[in-house]
Image (tube, helix red, strand yellow):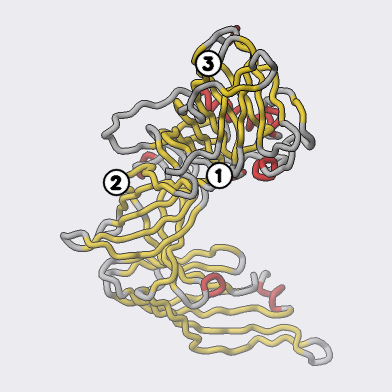
Amino acid sequence: MKRSMISIIVMALAGSGAWAKVDLVTLPTRGEVQLTIYNSADLTLARDSRDLTLREGDNTLQFSWANTLIDPTSLDMLPLKYAGEIDIADLTFPPRMRELGVWHINSGVSGPVPVKITYFTSGLSWRAFYMGTLSEDEKTMRLQGYVRVQNNSGEDYENAQTRLVVGKVHLLDQIAALARRKHPYGRPGPVPRPGPKAVRVVEKSARVMEGVVASAAIKMDADAPKKIIKEGLSEYFLYTIEGTETIRNGWAKRLPSFAADEVPVVNLYKYEEEMYGRAVMRFLSFSNDEKHKLGETPIPGGMLKVYRGVGEAAHLSYEGQSSFKYIPVEEEVELNLGAVANMIVEPKLMNIATENFRYNDHRNIIGWDEIATFKIEVKNTRDLPVKVEIKRNFGTPYWSLKKSGEHGQYEQVDADTVKFTLELPARSGRAFEYTLRKYQGVRQDESNR
């Protein structure tokens, strides 16, 4: 087991003025640790509970953050008992002693005193990822969410209650940079007890973080699976991992976030040369709402890997993956699962011509029509019915179109783009044609009359 890098030693003031170590464990056992991890700013708020053995009178507590990414300017200590009898006088950073701070404590009691030490650190991070398993008919999906917590802070956190925050916090100074400064405040010597302003966090962010730390611990059955408790905090969203977790330095741990069965989904295939080249792209969409068996909380951004259950044994076939951003409640998300080979769209230029020339007084051409006929062949080689959107971009707002064949639903998307939407049965094909007339030069004005 890796020994903690944070060293806390309580010392009593001897009658001669020399410092003598009290007879106690070098590192008092943590009662509990609370970690609140803000991914967007590489920031973690830690609250560390300790039982310190004090004697009546002056005491000295030494705190070392060697080999960690703790910001010493954010250190704060609060007695949880005997608050009126214990005075935490000051915090000193001795000269020629890096990564070491000394608290001077005047105690009116003798014996164990529970305290909480609060500080900011960096190096802890988390990310969300998801697994989606489509039903065999691909109309619904089982959606499972996970979070992966990574600890590169230099410190082991045993039995830590861990909270994950969705939302941005803005810092004027980076915590890792503050942790590596030669002297925390630019030079050694005593400093005032640091408060929220010392961490250089905007006021609203500091209030939110203090509120997070002050919330009650969540109890759980030791045999029950881990859950993530979610609650809103203004523009932030807090995910509390139920129970406690040991997160060692250099290690990562995956934890379940949520699971939702039979989430209704829409599969859609898209073809647009200007956007995707000659490939057909597959998209999967659903909404974060009650209708889709979701909607209780926002969904953090992450990577979704999609599989399909096949046959009675429900063997999985890999369908694709897509990353997405934060999905608020009541919002829809459309995921691009990538190019597919089992849907084919083949546009073919069948004929091209020009006509309706216009001339100026010098017999120069100043206007004409370009006429192009295209044939679109669509093939569905899957054993399921599919829906496909085909967009055609013309590069000009001056055009007219004639259609023929099984072109499905037709829609003009914008001034120079149209869309054909077709629904194809399993293992079927379809073809249609359109003739595009583009107006050039003065024919553009004539076409608008």
Residue to which mark 2 is pinned: 261
Image spot of residue 271 (x, y percent): 47, 71
Please name the residue shown 77% across and 33% down the image: 188
Quadrant position of residue 39: top right
Query: As drawn, which residue projects farthest toward the left?
Result: 312
Image spot of residue 416 (x, y percent): 60, 69
Question: Tag 3's secondary structure?
Answer: loop
Question: Tag 1's secondary structure?
Answer: loop
N-terminal-most mark, 3 or 1: 3
392 relative to 11, above or below: below
Quadrant position of residue 68: top right
Identify the amino acid type marked 2.
Answer: Asp
Question: Tag 2's secondary structure?
Answer: strand
N-terminal-most mark, 2 or 3: 3
Which quadrant would the N terminus be assigned to in this image?
Answer: top left
Between the residue at mark 2 and the residue at mark 3, the CA separation in whole angstroms equals 45 Å
77 relative to 273, above or below: above
Residue to which mark 1 is pinned: 153
Q: Nearer the viewer, residue 115 or 4?
A: 4
Identify the amino acid type marked 1.
Answer: Ser
Image spot of residue 219 (x, y percent): 36, 26
Identify the amino acid type marked 3.
Answer: Leu
Please name the residue shown 46% across and 66% down the image: 410
Residue to which mark 3 is pinned: 80
**Label 2 vs label 1, nearer the camera:** 1
